[in-house]
């Protein structure tokens, strides 16, 4: 089944404890991206990647890191989480060769930082 | 910088009636896509409809259609024959693209639509 898989789906952590949210897609998509969703603000893009070893900042990259060592994986790293990073996070991917721009989303990861 | 605005935080519609959700955007780019995504209570993000900026013809998908006014930078979504399953948050989104890549994606703040039986 074609899908974008995120883990963990739910996480409660404490300030300063490094964490990684994994994202994997099995559709051979070139484009992968991370978003955070907060009430009243919609989804805001954190980082995106068009290819292996190529990453670009979205609108809210501060406090986050990403890597794209393999085409299928795009982990989101919070080196020192803070309470203002409490949010719902989505990973999404897209196939450039289809020329549609359609994003395929994971199911979301609810992160709480205490 | 691109921005996407949805001026209606909440809307409601009677089942079987028609409703229009508004979206305006600001960009100086020529090559871009516009989308409406739906997020039901399950929180899964689902594509409703998409529009390519260079196409003048408005996109339609069954009960969903858009009114794309490129000069006015407006991209509204019309839902006909509203169904209970249409109850969801709706996000308007903009994606810039080039010949060899996709670029940033900008989402609006969302419109919460309730379909009333």
Image (cartoon, rainbow, N blue to C red):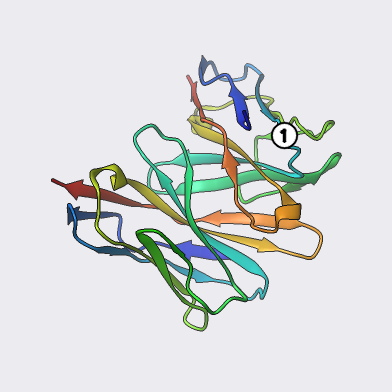
Question: Depth check: B39 or A17 in front?
Answer: B39
- Can you give x and y, in whole percent of width and height, for residue A21 in the image? 63, 24
- Read off the residue under disc 1: A65
Residue B113 horizontal/vertical position (percent): 28, 50
Image coords of residue B91 (percent x, y): 43, 53
Residue drawn at 19 percent across, 60 percent down: B17
Q: Is residue A55 visible?
A: no
Local secondary structure at mark 1: strand
In this view, the residue in front, B18 or A15, is B18
Q: Is residue A67 visible?
A: yes
- The residue at 19%/56% (across/down) is B16
A92 sits left or right of A49 in the view: left
Q: Image quadrant of residue A105?
A: top right
Residue at 56 percent of width and 33 percent of height: A106
As drawn, A7 above or below A67: above
Q: How many marks on residues?
A: 1
> How many other residues sit within 10 Å of disc 1, few (<14), some (14-19) or many (≥20)?
some
Q: Is residue A74 above or below residue B31?
A: above
Q: Is residue B105 left or right of residue A112?
A: right
Percent position (x, y) of residue B47? 49, 49
Please indicate whether residue B69 sits to the left or right of residue B87 in the image.
right
Q: Chain of mark 1?
A: A
The quarter of the picture where residue A48 lies is top right
Q: Residue furthest front?
A: B62
Residue located farthest toward the bottom when viewing the structure as drawn: B71
Image quadrant for the N terminus of chain A?
Answer: top right
**Residue at 81 percent of width and 60 percent of height:** B100
């Amino acid at each position: 089944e074609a899908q974008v898989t995120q883990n963990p789906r739910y996480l409660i952590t404490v300030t300063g404890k490094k964490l990684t949210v994994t994202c994997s897609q099995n559709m051979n998509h070139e484009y992968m991206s991370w978003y955070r969703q907060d009430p009243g603000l919609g989804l805001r893009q954190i980082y995106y990647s068009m290819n292996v070893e190529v990453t670009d900042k979205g609108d809210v990259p501060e406090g986050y890191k990403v890597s794209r060592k393999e085409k299928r994986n795009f982990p989101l790293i919070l080196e020192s989480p803070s309470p203002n990073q409490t949010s719902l996070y989505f990973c999404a991917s897209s196939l450039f060769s289809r020329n549609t721009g359609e994003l395929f989303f994971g199911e979301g990861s609810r992160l709480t930082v205490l | 910088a691109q921005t996407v605005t949805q001026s209606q935080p909440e809307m409601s519609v009677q089942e079987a009636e028609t409703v229009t959700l508004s979206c305006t955007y600001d960009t100086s780019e020529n090559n871009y896509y516009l989308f409406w995504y739906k997020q039901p209570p399950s929180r899964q993000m689902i594509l409703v409809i998409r529009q390519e900026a260079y196409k003048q013809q408005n996109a339609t998908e069954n009960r969903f259609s858009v009114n794309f006014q490129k000069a006015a930078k407006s991209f509204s979504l019309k839902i006909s024959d509203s169904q209970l399953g249409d109850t969801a948050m709706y996000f308007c989104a903009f994606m810039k693209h080039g010949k060899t890549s996709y670029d940033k994606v900008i989402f609006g703040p969302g419109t919460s639509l309730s379909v009333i039986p």
